[in-house]
Each structure stands twice: as structure tokens, then as C-alpha cells.
Amino acid sequence: MKKKRIAILGATGSIGTQALSVVREHRELFDVEVLTAAGNATLLIEQAMEFLPKVVVITDESKRAAVDEVLGSKGIEVLSGQQALEEVVQRPLIDIVLTALVGFAGLKPTIAAIKSGKNIALANKETLVVAGELIMKLAEKNEVAILPVDSEHSAIYQCLVGEEKSTLEKIYLTASGGPFRGKDATSLSTITKKEALMHPNWVMGQKITIDSASLMNKGLEVIEAKWLFGLDVDQIEVVVHPQSIIHSLVQFKDGSLKAQMGLPDMKLPIQYALTYPGRLANTFERFDFLKHPCLSFEQPDTKTFANLALAFDALRSGGNMPCVLNAANEVAVAAFLRDETGFREMSTIISETLQKIPFIASPKLDDYLQTDKEARLFAEQLVTKKKKVYQIEK
């Protein structure tokens, strides 16, 4: 495989650190040219000292001096601020950009990278949730590959290699069900942050872990899949698979199914995206059928876990509604992590925000940016309004 020059946006997060683990196994195949972090200057410095990128970006501008003090003497360029993310991904020293930023923050840097002709290893699902039609059209126009890093979308992508798109009937996105699978609505009313952060199968960042517990993560993946694979809503189904061994399935028009299987390890889809179209050997743990004799499947409970239903509704509405959904969810999750709202109340915040923000049928980039701003403001107002009541009840 030809050596690839990579930029990792969000290098200090869960996906970013695991991507660097992949690079360690194949140093002869990768040059890490750019590393970025939001505010974890200590880890960013440690990573840069090991991989010696040409540029690092710390978006928290107050920490630039501390990073520059250590890395400047090593000949590493240090930048700061959100605008620097959009600038650095356009540099000719990069072949592929791994976008592992959390939330809406990934949208503008991804657009900038696509416009400059960089292939995208996409771990930031919110980019397609917010502006999927715009992103996919840009990618086609600039002849850029969007390679999914989410385990479910990577599974679908792998199952479709060598297949004619016209033969695809539907896809099944699998969900573990999270730590509260089987609980009723009453039980969810007393869920704590500590409980919600204990995912049974995957090790992830806080935001995505809470999303997984509420099934919003699966809802966001449904929207992402629609754009990645050019599907109608009715061609996407979610099935709960508690063991997280089958990462997703494709059903063809003759009734046959393809599934991609493996242990729940994000390094596998990360490596696949970074090395595509090749498959490289590694030392990751192997699956043993005898240790997993039973694989089970269930229908998701969308009445108890309303976020999944809200995501499907937003996708069916189209326009800027998925953008509203995403913004409200980011606000609700942040409030939950601050102990300012309850687990079930997150769905209420999202639902009320979806009803409040005006619908735009064919949004442009500026419409998405304005929608995100308005939805966040309204959701924050809801959090403030409900905060006292929640804390009294708590």
C-alpha cells in the first residue's frame, strides 16, 4: 500500500487515540502530518512528541502558548482556534483526514477538507446528520471518498463492496441496546450519569456513550446511513443485538443477507477506513465462535427510548429537521452530564425543540448554521426553565 499522509481531527479523543494505535502497528504505511485537540494540551503534546506531525492545532486558544513552548523547539507548527481547523485540512501535505471531532464542530472542517480534495475517514456522524445532502454532493463534485468509521456503517460499506447498488433491498443497523436495555420508562426516570456512562460493550467518549444509552446514537446512525448509501427511510431498519458481534447487515433483493462480524473493537473500522481498499494484518484479538455460542436479536423499544423514534421522524420530515434534532440533543446531553436534567427529560427537550424551530425544506449551509444556533438557544432555554424543577424532584 502506498504510504498515506493523515490528519487526525480530535486526536486526543477515543477515536483519535485508537487511530494512533493503528498507526503504531503500521508506521511504515502512515505519516501523521496533523494532530488536533480541543483542550487536552497535555495529551496532544505527548502524541506530537511521539509522531512528530508537521502541524498541531489546539482549538482552546488559551492553551496555545503552553503547547508551543514544548513543540515549537521541535519544529512543529502550532496553531489555535476553530478557524485553524478549517485552514489546516486544506494543506497539500495531507492525503486523508480522519474527522473524529465531537458533534456539530466537525461540519465546517469536513467541508473545507472535501473542497480541497481530501478523502475523509468519517467518525463524526453529526456532519451527515446535519447536512448529509450537502456533504455527499460536495464529495461527488470533488471526487472525494467518504469512508465511514462508525462500526455499523463500516460494516454496511464492507458488505456492499463488489455489489451492484441496484440489488440492495434494505439494511439492518444493529444496536447493543445500551446499559438500560429492557428497562421501562419508570426505571429510566432515576438513571444517574454514572450508570449511563457504563456501556456494556464499547469504550467511547462521554457524549457518544450517553447517546448510546438513550438510543439517540442509533437514530443519528440511521440518518447518516441514509446519506452514505443513498437509501430511502423505509430501507433502513434497526435491530437490537446485545452481543455487538454482528455490526450490521445488508439484505439484497433476492432475500440473501450479508453480515460483517467481529469483536467490538473500534480499531477495526478505523484501520479499514485508513487502509481502504487494502486489508492489513494486525495483532488485534480474534473472534472465537465457541466463546459466543448465542447471538440474539430484538426489536428496539421506541416508546421507552423515544430518541430513536424522534430521529426517524426528523429524517422523514427532512430539510433542516435533522439539524434541529442534533443541536437539541447536544444541548440535552451536555445538560445531563452537568446534572441539570434527567435521562428521560433529554427526549422532552429534543421533542419540544423540533416543534419550535421553523422548517426549511431545502437548506443551504448558512441555513444549517442558523438552524443550529436557534435550536441550541431554544434548547438551552428549556434546560434553564426545567432545571429547578428537575433538581427539586431529584
Image: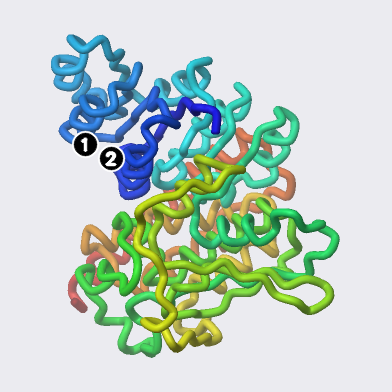
Q: How is the image coloured?
A: rainbow
- Residue 84's x, y, as percent? 40, 21
Q: Which mark is residue 12?
A: 2
Q: In which quadrant of the rendered image does the C terminus lie? A: bottom left
Answer above or below: position of 326 versus 97: below
Task: Kindly identify the residue that appears in the image at 25 percent across and 72 percent down.
Answer: 390
> Is residue 384 among the parts visible in the rendering?
no
Dot placed on the residue nearer the N-terminal end, 1 or 2: 2
Depth check, front residue: 370 or 33: 33
Task: Kindly identify the residue that appears in the image at 83 percent across and 73 percent down.
Answer: 253
- Residue 44's x, y, as percent? 23, 31
- Residue 121's x, y, as percent? 52, 41
Depth check, front residue: 331 or 352: 331
Gap in Å between the C-alphas at discs 1 and 2? 7 Å
* The quadrant where residue 387 appears: bottom left
Task: Kindly identify the residue that appears in the image at 28 percent across and 16 percent down.
Answer: 78
- Which residue was labeled with disc 1? 40
Depth check, front residue: 54 or 85: 54
User: Decide: marks 1, 2 in contact (CB < 8 A)?
Assistant: yes
Q: Amino acid at mark 2?
A: Thr
Label 1: few (<14), some or many (≥20) within 10 Å?
Answer: some
Q: In which quadrant of the rendered image does the N terminus lie? A: top right
Answer above or below: position of 59 versus 166: above
Classify mark 1: helix, strand or loop.
Answer: loop
Answer above or below: position of 309 versus 167: below
Q: Amino acid at mark 1?
A: Asn
